[in-house]
Image: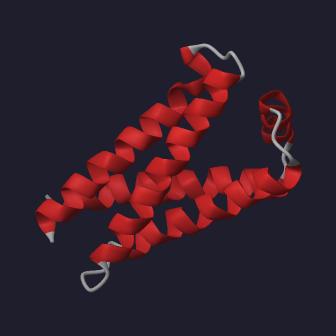
Amino acid sequence: MYTLNVIVAVLLGVAFVMFGIGKLADIKQMAEARQHLGLPTGLFRAVGALEVLGGIGVLLGLHHDLPLIGILAAIGLIGMTIGAAAYHQKAGDTIKEWMPAVVMGSLAIFYIILRIASA
């Protein structure tokens, strides 16, 4: 169970750190997404910073003394993915565009279940 927990945490943590860095750096693909969703640059960068912090929190949660940090970070990331799906839906996007948010949110839920079961 621990190995699966590590795999899920690393996937989740690294993915959100990378997404967040992309938003903070305002790379072309992220800038296009920001404009499409109608988000101000400052808000988009704040979301990016929260994604980086959440991803780091999930990775820190792997430490045997810090499971609560990982769980709380994952809860925050679930909120972020719900917001992302809502913004994509509001923009009239198809499920293809907002499915990554649903998948990442589902992965965060799975991480929480695994972390609680192995704590």
Pick the residue in front: 28 or 37.
Answer: 37
| Residue at horizontal 56 percent and vertical 32 percent from the top | 85
Q: Quick check: 85 left or right of 10?
A: right
Q: Is residue 12 left or right of residue 1?
A: right
Q: Position of residue 87 (x, y in %)?
A: 65, 32
Which quarter of the image is occupied by the N terminus?
A: bottom left
Left-right relation of 107 to 28: left
Colouring method of the image: secondary structure
Q: Look at 65% across and 50% down and name the residue there.
A: 19
Q: Where is residue 7, by image quadrant?
A: bottom left
Note whether 23 is above or below 62 in the view shown: above
Q: Is residue 45 visible?
A: yes
User: How many discs appear?
Assistant: 0
Location of residue 44 in the rendering, given as x and y in whole percent from the top left corner: 77, 50
**Residue 61 in picture, x, y percent from top left:** 35, 73
- Classify residue 107 by image quadrant: top left
Q: Tell which of 71 and 10 is nearer to you.
A: 71
**Is the C terminus in the top left, top right, bottom left or bottom right quadrant?**
bottom left
